[in-house]
Amino acid sequence: MVIKLLLLIIFFTVFIFVGIKCRFASKDVNGYVLGGRTVGPWLTAFAYGTSYFSAVIFVGYAGQFGWNFGIASTWIGLGNAFLGSLLPWVVLGRRTRIMTQHLNSKTMPDFFGQRFASSGLKISASAITFLFLIPYTASLFNGLSRLFKMAFNVDYSVCVIVMAVFTAVYVIIGGYMATAINDFIQGIIMLVGIIAVIYTVLSKNGGFMQSLALMSEIESPVMNGAYTSFFGPDPFYLLIVVLLTSLGTWGLPQMVGKFYAIKNEHSIKRGTMISTLFAIVVAGGCFFLGGFARLFNSVEQVRENGFDSIVPSMLSGLGDMLIAVVLILVLSASMSTLSSLVLTSSSTLTLDFINPLRKKRLPDSQNLFVMRLFIAVFIVISAVIAIVQAKSKVTFIAQLMGISWGALSGSFFAPFFYGLYWKKVSKASVISSFCFGCSIMIVQLFVSIGFIDFSGSFFNFVFRNSLYSGVFCMLSSLIIVPVVSLLTPKTCPANVEEMFAGYNATHMVMAKEILTDENGKQ
């Protein structure tokens, strides 16, 4: 217990110290929200990765899908690395950085407002962001608090409150730069921790090969050895999970926002490699570990305690030092994601919702005060929901995360992607995507809590769970946006050519900043 408490005290002390040191970089809105757009590749890549992977992944998804798919759940982690990390950096990174600077937009809702010349879109996107980030934040509290209860036998509510208070302190004081530096520290902890945990957990059953042999003996209603097969017992459902958890990042404001703040072109290229490698180790490691869940849990235990209890059960027999490492690992993952979520939510609510509704624009000092106030409000609301949700029927994390990701990415993914590349995207198509994504996931929420039942109908497939409906939203929006745009060309902004001029702008630089080969090519 002394070791655990000592590591926690050091952990929280370091992050509060970083928050205090970074307060000077957060004196204006641009510095507080984007770090002055001067954040380097390592900080940005780790901020992207640690915002991506949290207790939701480590406790919720790794446990649930490791149980369902066995070793094949590793594909989810690899999908996250290549579809959710590598491709967004390659496809969105550079264009996002150039377009948002050209439009002087600081958030995703602000991008929609500037790109499509509509304050209504800006306000709507801000409301969607705030509302649907709350269940995601609540799911973070849920996963982390289960591990704290296992390690310290502390009441769930106390865990939620402590985590909320410490996160609020360093984000309120230091803003984006504090979260980026802390994310880097947390990322290092996650890399070391996941490797140590995998090695130790598998050693309980004689190592990797012996664990694999034991997994192959577990019976499955589908086929013998299903949990060690290449694609597991349910390949189609596995594909759905990969798509939601990977493509979902393309439309999440807290993820795409990392590209707004990166320093330059060189940083984007380096950040792409760093982010991908980070995701391979952390996401691949989490789901690989979860694939051995059936060696540590019985069907009766899972049926009684739910999927969220699987990973804590796998870790419960570890030594005190390793338990402390696991706590710091999951705490790092969760607090980094939480800090990103609350900063995104508060900034978009202040800059994109409240400011447009006011006749007189607030000065920077007042905007900063309001953002900090909303960080506290957002955390309080999320913590209350997490405590109430833990005692309700919707007990597993994946449902909350699926609804949040489905609504946000189903609404934003296609308009943002097409908006960066295609001049003919219309305002009407963006409205259609917003309405479709939110409507589908609200219906899914009612289905999940039992208010609506589609059993036996055609809609049962789409609304089987939040993962299916979330993927349906994202893929459908990729069709809805271009089709509606072609049918409503008059709602395209008049100055779209000027918006895309930033991609072809010429900039004078010092000769020492240019490296050329013997042919004079850059």
Image (cartoon, rainbow, N blue to C red):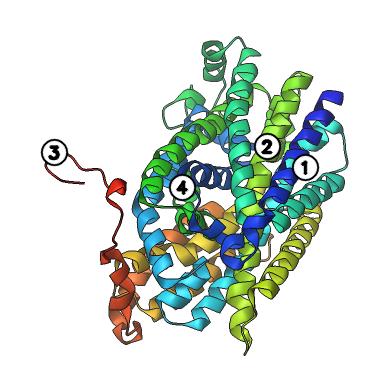
Percent of width and height locating residue 389: 77, 54
Cα distance in 3D space between marks 4 and 2: 20 Å
Q: Earlier in the sequence, mark 1 or mark 4?
A: 1
Mark number displayed over residue 330: 2
Crowd band around label 1 with a 10 angstrom C-alpha radius: few (<14), some (14–19), many (20+): many
Q: Earlier in the sequence, mark 1 or mark 3?
A: 1
The residue under label 4 is 246
Q: Which of marks 1 and 3 is in front?
A: 3
Instruction: Decide which of 288, 360 is in the foreground and name it.
Output: 360
Q: Earlier in the sequence, mark 2 or mark 3?
A: 2
Left or right, 486 with reference to 145:
left
Q: Earlier in the sequence, mark 4 or mark 2?
A: 4
Percent of width and height locating residue 28: 62, 66
Mark number displayed over residue 518: 3
Percent of width and height locating residue 429: 39, 76
Percent of width and height locating residue 430: 42, 74
Crowd band around label 3 with a 10 angstrom C-alpha radius: few (<14), some (14–19), many (20+): few
Cα distance in 3D space between marks 1 and 4: 25 Å
The residue under label 1 is 145
